Amino acid sequence: MAALKQLAERCDVLTYEFENVDADGLDAVIKDGQLPQGTDLLRISQNRIFEKDFLAKKAGVQVAPYKVVTSSLDLEGLDLSKNYVLKTATGGYDGHGQKVIREEADLVEASQLANSAECVLEEFVNFDLEISVLVSGNGSDYTVFPVQENIHRNNILYKTIVPARIFDELAEKAKTMALQIADKLHLVGTLCVEMFVAGQEILVNEIAPRPHNSGHYSIEACDFSQFDTHIRGILGEPLPPIRLLSPAVMINVLGQDMETVQTFLQENPTAHPHFYGKLEAKHNRKMGHVTVLGEDAESVEEFEN
Protein backbone atom coordinates (compact mmCIF):
# COMPACT_ATOMS: atom_id res chain seq x y z
CA MET A 1 0.00 0.00 0.00
CA ALA A 2 2.85 2.38 0.81
CA ALA A 3 4.43 1.84 -2.61
CA LEU A 4 1.07 2.39 -4.32
CA LYS A 5 0.54 5.62 -2.39
CA GLN A 6 4.02 6.82 -3.31
CA LEU A 7 3.38 6.07 -6.98
CA ALA A 8 0.08 7.96 -6.89
CA GLU A 9 1.75 10.97 -5.28
CA ARG A 10 4.40 11.10 -8.00
CA CYS A 11 2.12 10.71 -11.03
CA ASP A 12 -0.53 12.90 -12.62
CA VAL A 13 -2.20 9.96 -14.38
CA LEU A 14 -2.11 6.27 -13.50
CA THR A 15 -2.95 3.26 -15.64
CA TYR A 16 -2.80 -0.49 -15.11
CA GLU A 17 -1.82 -3.23 -17.55
CA PHE A 18 -2.54 -6.21 -15.30
CA GLU A 19 -5.91 -7.03 -13.80
CA ASN A 20 -4.69 -8.51 -10.51
CA VAL A 21 -4.20 -5.11 -8.92
CA ASP A 22 -5.63 -4.21 -5.51
CA ALA A 23 -8.73 -2.24 -6.48
CA ASP A 24 -9.47 -1.18 -2.89
CA GLY A 25 -5.87 -0.04 -2.51
CA LEU A 26 -6.14 2.04 -5.66
CA ASP A 27 -9.38 3.64 -4.50
CA ALA A 28 -7.69 4.56 -1.22
CA VAL A 29 -4.77 6.45 -2.78
CA ILE A 30 -5.95 7.96 -6.08
CA LYS A 31 -7.36 11.44 -6.55
CA ASP A 32 -10.41 12.18 -8.72
CA GLY A 33 -9.58 11.60 -12.36
CA GLN A 34 -6.11 10.23 -11.64
CA LEU A 35 -7.04 6.71 -12.78
CA PRO A 36 -9.13 7.22 -15.94
CA GLN A 37 -9.82 3.47 -16.29
CA GLY A 38 -11.41 3.46 -12.85
CA THR A 39 -11.62 0.39 -10.63
CA ASP A 40 -15.09 -0.94 -11.56
CA LEU A 41 -13.68 -2.77 -14.59
CA LEU A 42 -10.89 -4.17 -12.42
CA ARG A 43 -13.43 -5.65 -10.01
CA ILE A 44 -15.48 -7.14 -12.83
CA SER A 45 -12.49 -8.76 -14.51
CA GLN A 46 -11.00 -10.01 -11.23
CA ASN A 47 -14.03 -12.15 -10.41
CA ARG A 48 -15.48 -14.59 -12.94
CA ILE A 49 -18.89 -14.47 -11.27
CA PHE A 50 -19.06 -10.68 -11.61
CA GLU A 51 -17.69 -11.01 -15.15
CA LYS A 52 -20.23 -13.60 -16.34
CA ASP A 53 -23.12 -11.69 -14.76
CA PHE A 54 -21.98 -8.43 -16.36
CA LEU A 55 -21.53 -9.95 -19.81
CA ALA A 56 -24.78 -11.92 -19.84
CA LYS A 57 -27.11 -9.62 -17.92
CA LYS A 58 -25.80 -6.08 -18.47
CA ALA A 59 -23.90 -6.16 -21.74
CA GLY A 60 -26.40 -8.62 -23.20
CA VAL A 61 -23.87 -10.75 -25.07
CA GLN A 62 -23.98 -14.52 -25.36
CA VAL A 63 -21.82 -16.59 -23.02
CA ALA A 64 -21.60 -20.32 -22.36
CA PRO A 65 -24.25 -21.61 -19.93
CA TYR A 66 -22.85 -21.28 -16.40
CA LYS A 67 -23.68 -21.58 -12.71
CA VAL A 68 -22.05 -20.35 -9.53
CA VAL A 69 -20.46 -23.11 -7.43
CA THR A 70 -19.81 -22.45 -3.74
CA SER A 71 -18.97 -26.03 -2.68
CA SER A 72 -18.81 -29.59 -3.99
CA LEU A 73 -22.51 -29.92 -3.15
CA ASP A 74 -23.25 -27.79 -6.20
CA LEU A 75 -21.64 -30.46 -8.38
CA GLU A 76 -23.98 -33.22 -7.25
CA GLY A 77 -26.33 -34.56 -9.90
CA LEU A 78 -24.29 -33.06 -12.72
CA ASP A 79 -25.42 -34.19 -16.17
CA LEU A 80 -22.28 -35.96 -17.35
CA SER A 81 -23.58 -36.31 -20.89
CA LYS A 82 -22.12 -32.80 -21.18
CA ASN A 83 -18.57 -31.59 -20.56
CA TYR A 84 -17.77 -28.71 -18.21
CA VAL A 85 -14.98 -26.42 -17.11
CA LEU A 86 -14.83 -25.51 -13.42
CA LYS A 87 -12.92 -22.27 -12.81
CA THR A 88 -12.10 -20.48 -9.58
CA ALA A 89 -13.92 -17.15 -9.37
CA THR A 90 -10.72 -15.28 -8.58
CA GLY A 91 -7.09 -15.85 -9.50
CA GLY A 92 -5.94 -18.29 -12.13
CA TYR A 93 -4.42 -17.61 -15.52
CA ASP A 94 -3.08 -19.63 -18.49
CA GLY A 95 -5.13 -22.63 -17.36
CA HIS A 96 -4.36 -22.44 -13.62
CA GLY A 97 -7.31 -22.75 -11.24
CA GLN A 98 -9.35 -24.79 -13.72
CA LYS A 99 -10.59 -28.35 -14.01
CA VAL A 100 -12.24 -29.95 -17.04
CA ILE A 101 -15.04 -32.38 -16.14
CA ARG A 102 -15.71 -35.09 -18.73
CA GLU A 103 -16.50 -38.12 -16.58
CA GLU A 104 -17.26 -39.22 -13.04
CA ALA A 105 -13.57 -39.61 -12.19
CA ASP A 106 -12.96 -35.91 -12.85
CA LEU A 107 -15.34 -34.97 -10.05
CA VAL A 108 -12.77 -35.88 -7.39
CA GLU A 109 -10.40 -33.06 -8.33
CA ALA A 110 -13.30 -30.80 -9.26
CA SER A 111 -14.83 -31.25 -5.80
CA GLN A 112 -11.52 -30.38 -4.17
CA LEU A 113 -11.34 -27.22 -6.25
CA ALA A 114 -14.97 -26.34 -5.46
CA ASN A 115 -14.36 -26.75 -1.73
CA SER A 116 -11.23 -24.61 -1.84
CA ALA A 117 -12.73 -21.51 -3.47
CA GLU A 118 -15.86 -20.03 -4.97
CA CYS A 119 -16.09 -21.15 -8.61
CA VAL A 120 -17.96 -20.82 -11.87
CA LEU A 121 -19.04 -23.97 -13.71
CA GLU A 122 -19.32 -23.47 -17.46
CA GLU A 123 -20.64 -25.89 -20.03
CA PHE A 124 -17.80 -26.81 -22.36
CA VAL A 125 -18.07 -25.07 -25.72
CA ASN A 126 -17.31 -27.21 -28.76
CA PHE A 127 -15.87 -24.28 -30.64
CA ASP A 128 -14.41 -24.10 -34.12
CA LEU A 129 -11.80 -21.54 -33.18
CA GLU A 130 -10.92 -18.91 -30.60
CA ILE A 131 -10.86 -15.23 -31.47
CA SER A 132 -10.37 -11.95 -29.67
CA VAL A 133 -11.22 -8.34 -30.38
CA LEU A 134 -9.38 -5.31 -29.05
CA VAL A 135 -11.41 -2.19 -28.41
CA SER A 136 -10.20 1.14 -27.01
CA GLY A 137 -12.28 3.96 -25.59
CA ASN A 138 -12.05 7.42 -24.07
CA GLY A 139 -15.27 7.10 -22.06
CA SER A 140 -17.64 8.05 -24.85
CA ASP A 141 -16.07 7.15 -28.20
CA TYR A 142 -14.62 3.78 -29.14
CA THR A 143 -12.43 2.26 -31.83
CA VAL A 144 -12.11 -1.42 -32.66
CA PHE A 145 -9.26 -3.48 -34.08
CA PRO A 146 -9.44 -6.32 -36.63
CA VAL A 147 -10.64 -9.68 -35.33
CA GLN A 148 -7.76 -11.90 -34.21
CA GLU A 149 -7.66 -15.70 -34.41
CA ASN A 150 -5.88 -17.28 -31.45
CA ILE A 151 -4.27 -20.70 -31.21
CA HIS A 152 -3.36 -22.05 -27.77
CA ARG A 153 -1.03 -24.80 -26.60
CA ASN A 154 -1.35 -26.14 -23.07
CA ASN A 155 -3.72 -23.25 -22.26
CA ILE A 156 -1.08 -20.68 -23.27
CA LEU A 157 -1.49 -18.41 -26.28
CA TYR A 158 0.92 -19.62 -28.93
CA LYS A 159 -0.08 -17.95 -32.18
CA THR A 160 -2.33 -15.09 -33.31
CA ILE A 161 -3.45 -14.72 -36.94
CA VAL A 162 -4.85 -11.43 -38.22
CA PRO A 163 -7.34 -11.12 -39.76
CA ALA A 164 -9.07 -14.15 -38.29
CA ARG A 165 -10.01 -16.80 -40.84
CA ILE A 166 -13.77 -16.38 -40.47
CA PHE A 167 -16.55 -15.01 -42.67
CA ASP A 168 -16.91 -11.23 -42.77
CA GLU A 169 -20.39 -11.44 -41.24
CA LEU A 170 -19.02 -13.22 -38.17
CA ALA A 171 -16.14 -10.76 -37.89
CA GLU A 172 -18.57 -7.84 -37.91
CA LYS A 173 -20.71 -9.58 -35.29
CA ALA A 174 -17.65 -10.02 -33.05
CA LYS A 175 -16.71 -6.35 -33.41
CA THR A 176 -20.27 -5.28 -32.62
CA MET A 177 -20.26 -7.38 -29.45
CA ALA A 178 -16.93 -5.89 -28.35
CA LEU A 179 -18.24 -2.36 -28.92
CA GLN A 180 -21.43 -3.22 -27.03
CA ILE A 181 -19.36 -4.31 -24.03
CA ALA A 182 -17.17 -1.19 -24.26
CA ASP A 183 -20.22 1.05 -24.33
CA LYS A 184 -21.77 -0.57 -21.24
CA LEU A 185 -18.46 -0.10 -19.42
CA HIS A 186 -17.96 3.49 -20.61
CA LEU A 187 -14.55 2.09 -21.45
CA VAL A 188 -11.42 4.16 -20.99
CA GLY A 189 -8.23 2.59 -22.36
CA THR A 190 -7.83 -0.74 -24.14
CA LEU A 191 -9.89 -3.86 -23.50
CA CYS A 192 -9.53 -7.33 -25.01
CA VAL A 193 -12.67 -9.42 -25.48
CA GLU A 194 -11.93 -13.13 -25.86
CA MET A 195 -14.52 -15.18 -27.73
CA PHE A 196 -15.38 -18.62 -29.12
CA VAL A 197 -16.71 -19.19 -32.63
CA ALA A 198 -19.11 -22.15 -32.75
CA GLY A 199 -20.75 -22.48 -36.14
CA GLN A 200 -22.59 -19.22 -36.73
CA GLU A 201 -22.57 -18.33 -33.03
CA ILE A 202 -20.09 -16.23 -31.11
CA LEU A 203 -19.82 -16.62 -27.34
CA VAL A 204 -17.82 -14.29 -25.13
CA ASN A 205 -15.39 -16.17 -22.90
CA GLU A 206 -13.78 -13.41 -20.85
CA ILE A 207 -12.50 -9.85 -20.89
CA ALA A 208 -9.06 -8.45 -20.08
CA PRO A 209 -9.02 -4.73 -19.11
CA ARG A 210 -5.68 -3.92 -20.72
CA PRO A 211 -3.52 -4.24 -23.80
CA HIS A 212 -3.38 -7.96 -24.51
CA ASN A 213 -0.85 -10.53 -25.68
CA SER A 214 -3.00 -11.35 -28.70
CA GLY A 215 -2.86 -7.70 -29.77
CA HIS A 216 0.91 -7.31 -29.94
CA TYR A 217 0.76 -7.79 -33.72
CA SER A 218 -0.74 -4.28 -33.90
CA ILE A 219 2.67 -2.70 -33.24
CA GLU A 220 3.72 -3.43 -36.82
CA ALA A 221 0.51 -4.43 -38.60
CA CYS A 222 -1.78 -1.48 -37.79
CA ASP A 223 -1.50 2.28 -38.20
CA PHE A 224 -2.10 2.61 -34.44
CA SER A 225 -1.08 -0.07 -31.95
CA GLN A 226 -3.17 -1.19 -28.98
CA PHE A 227 -0.73 0.76 -26.80
CA ASP A 228 -1.18 3.94 -28.85
CA THR A 229 -4.95 3.81 -28.49
CA HIS A 230 -4.71 2.89 -24.81
CA ILE A 231 -2.72 6.04 -24.07
CA ARG A 232 -4.96 8.19 -26.27
CA GLY A 233 -7.98 6.76 -24.47
CA ILE A 234 -6.82 7.42 -20.92
CA LEU A 235 -5.80 10.96 -21.92
CA GLY A 236 -9.27 11.58 -23.33
CA GLU A 237 -8.03 12.16 -26.86
CA PRO A 238 -10.00 11.30 -30.03
CA LEU A 239 -9.66 7.70 -31.17
CA PRO A 240 -9.09 7.14 -34.90
CA PRO A 241 -10.46 4.23 -36.92
CA ILE A 242 -7.90 1.42 -37.01
CA ARG A 243 -6.44 0.40 -40.36
CA LEU A 244 -4.76 -2.98 -40.87
CA LEU A 245 -1.64 -2.23 -42.90
CA SER A 246 -0.82 -5.89 -43.51
CA PRO A 247 -2.09 -9.31 -42.50
CA ALA A 248 0.09 -10.69 -39.73
CA VAL A 249 1.00 -13.73 -37.69
CA MET A 250 2.33 -13.31 -34.17
CA ILE A 251 4.04 -16.22 -32.40
CA ASN A 252 4.87 -16.13 -28.71
CA VAL A 253 8.41 -17.03 -27.72
CA LEU A 254 8.37 -19.31 -24.68
CA GLY A 255 11.32 -20.27 -22.53
CA GLN A 256 11.89 -23.49 -24.44
CA ASP A 257 11.93 -21.57 -27.75
CA MET A 258 14.86 -19.29 -27.02
CA GLU A 259 17.33 -21.27 -29.12
CA THR A 260 15.06 -22.22 -32.00
CA VAL A 261 13.75 -18.67 -32.37
CA GLN A 262 17.24 -17.56 -33.36
CA THR A 263 17.19 -20.00 -36.27
CA PHE A 264 13.70 -18.78 -37.18
CA LEU A 265 14.88 -15.17 -37.24
CA GLN A 266 17.86 -16.03 -39.43
CA GLU A 267 15.53 -17.73 -41.89
CA ASN A 268 12.96 -14.90 -41.69
CA PRO A 269 15.01 -11.68 -41.68
CA THR A 270 11.93 -9.48 -42.18
CA ALA A 271 10.27 -10.80 -39.01
CA HIS A 272 9.84 -8.39 -36.09
CA PRO A 273 11.16 -9.83 -32.80
CA HIS A 274 10.33 -8.39 -29.39
CA PHE A 275 12.05 -9.77 -26.29
CA TYR A 276 10.87 -8.73 -22.85
CA GLY A 277 14.18 -8.66 -20.98
CA LYS A 278 13.33 -11.45 -18.56
CA LEU A 279 16.50 -12.78 -16.98
CA GLU A 280 15.56 -16.45 -16.71
CA ALA A 281 14.07 -18.55 -19.52
CA LYS A 282 11.67 -20.99 -17.87
CA HIS A 283 9.58 -23.64 -19.61
CA ASN A 284 6.31 -22.11 -20.91
CA ARG A 285 7.32 -18.65 -19.68
CA LYS A 286 6.58 -15.91 -22.20
CA MET A 287 9.94 -14.42 -23.11
CA GLY A 288 8.86 -12.38 -26.11
CA HIS A 289 7.05 -12.58 -29.43
CA VAL A 290 7.75 -12.45 -33.14
CA THR A 291 5.46 -10.84 -35.71
CA VAL A 292 5.60 -11.75 -39.39
CA LEU A 293 3.76 -9.58 -41.92
CA GLY A 294 2.34 -11.11 -45.09
CA GLU A 295 -0.70 -12.49 -46.85
CA ASP A 296 -0.22 -16.21 -46.22
CA ALA A 297 -0.64 -17.26 -42.60
CA GLU A 298 -0.06 -20.91 -43.50
CA SER A 299 3.45 -20.14 -44.73
CA VAL A 300 4.65 -18.97 -41.31
CA GLU A 301 6.39 -21.96 -39.79
CA GLU A 302 6.32 -22.60 -36.07
CA PHE A 303 9.31 -22.86 -33.76
CA GLU A 304 10.35 -26.51 -33.70
CA ASN A 305 12.07 -27.88 -30.62
Image (cartoon, rainbow, N blue to C red):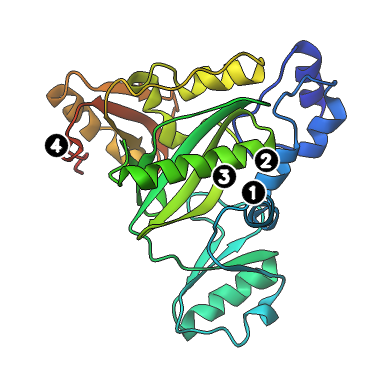
Residue placed under numbered mark 3 in the picture:
207
Horizontal side of 124 relative to 127 (left or right) equals right
Provide residue 244's location: percent of width, then percent of height: 34, 24
**215 and 257: which is toward the camera:** 215
- Label 2 sits on a secondary structure element that is helix
| Comes first in the chain, label 1 or label 3 | 1
- Which residue type carries mark 1? Ala
Horizontal side of 223 relative to 227 (left or right) equals left
Task: Check disc 1: other Cα within 10 Å, few if <14, some if 14-19, many if 20+.
Answer: some
- Which residue type carries mark 4? Ser
Distance (Cα) linking label 2 and label 1? 6 Å
Distance (Cα) linking label 3 and label 2? 13 Å
Residue placed under numbered mark 1 in the picture:
59
- Label 3 sits on a secondary structure element that is strand
| Comes first in the chain, label 4 or label 3 | 3
Q: Residue at x 53, y 41 (%)?
A: 178
- Which residue type carries mark 2? Lys
Badge 1 vs badge 3, beta-carbon distance below 8 Å: no
**41 and 165: which is toward the camera:** 165
Distance (Cα) linking label 1 and label 4? 38 Å
29 vs 45: above or below: above
Provide residue 101's location: percent of width, then percent of height: 48, 74
Q: Which mark is residue 299?
A: 4
Distance (Cα) linking label 2 and label 4? 40 Å
Provide residue 39's location: percent of width, then percent of height: 75, 35
